[in-house]
Image (tube, rainbow, N blue to C red):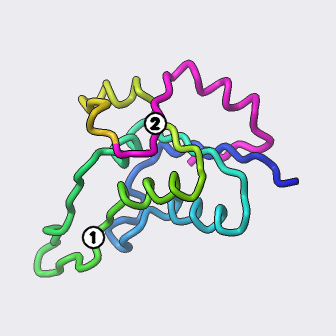
């Protein structure tokens, strides 16, 4: 039986200037593809990942254009489609002025106080 893994993602936009993916979100897809039983919690600045309608297509640094801009909202939504429980800490959304109506489909709102309950139902916890 697979161990239940809780992955808390707090650090946002890791490596997205060099790549089109957040490395930890990519890793969650790979782990799920290998059969891992995952729950993902987005908190802190990573709550920005669930904002509907992000568009980084105009991203450029000097003369260098990012031709494969990140589409992290799509990457997170695809995790939910794969059967991963994806939560976002609603207190962190509010602190950043993000309305619950701006959150992509498939993501569940979680009060900050609810994180402790997820710890109790997990065999392993990763914090990124």
Q: Residue 41: within the magenta? A: no
Residue at position x 33%, y 40% from top? 103
For the residue carrying disc 1, how many other residues have a C-alpha within 10 Å: few (<14), some (14-19), or many (20+)? Answer: some
Q: Secondary structure at mark 2?
A: strand
Instruction: Tell me where residue 36 appears, x and y as whole percent.
Output: 72, 58
Q: Residue 124: within the magenta? A: yes
Which residue position is annotated with label 2? Answer: 88
Closest to the camera, between mark 1 and mark 2, is 2
Checking the image for residue 57, the label placed there is none
Q: Which residues lie in the magenta part?
A: 104-128
Task: Using the image, determine if residue 25 lies above or below residue 112.
Answer: below
| Earlier residue among tags 1 and 2 | 1
Tell me where residue 47 sits by quadrant: top left
Residue at position x 66%, y 63% from top? 31
Q: Is residue 28 left or right of residue 21?
A: right
- Nearest the camera: 96 or 72? 72
Instruction: Tell me where residue 52 appears, x and y as whole percent.
Output: 27, 47
Checking the image for residue 69, the label placed there is 1
Residue at position x 65%, y 62% from top? 32
Task: Using the image, determine if residue 68 lies above or below residue 101.
Answer: below
Task: Using the image, determine if residue 118 lies above or below residue 48.
Answer: above
Q: Is residue 2 left or right of residue 110?
A: right
Tell me where residue 64 sits by quadrant: bottom left
Task: Using the image, determine if residue 45 lies above or below residue 91.
Answer: below
């Amino acid at each position: 039986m697979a161990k239940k893994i809780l992955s808390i993602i707090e650090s946002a936009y890791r490596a997205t200037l060099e790549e089109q993916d957040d490395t930890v979100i990519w890793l969650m897809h790979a782990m799920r593809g290998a059969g891992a039983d995952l729950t993902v919690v987005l908190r802190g600045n990573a709550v920005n990942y669930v904002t509907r309608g992000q568009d980084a297509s105009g991203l450029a640094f000097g003369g260098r254009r990012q031709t494969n801009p990140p589409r992290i909202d799509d990457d997170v939504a695809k995790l939910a489609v794969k059967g991963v429980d994806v939560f976002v800490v609603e207190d962190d959304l509010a602190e950043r002025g993000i309305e619950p109506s701006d959150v992509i489909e498939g993501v569940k709102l979680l009060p900050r106080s609810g994180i402790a309950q997820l710890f109790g139902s997990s065999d392993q916890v990763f914090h990124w």
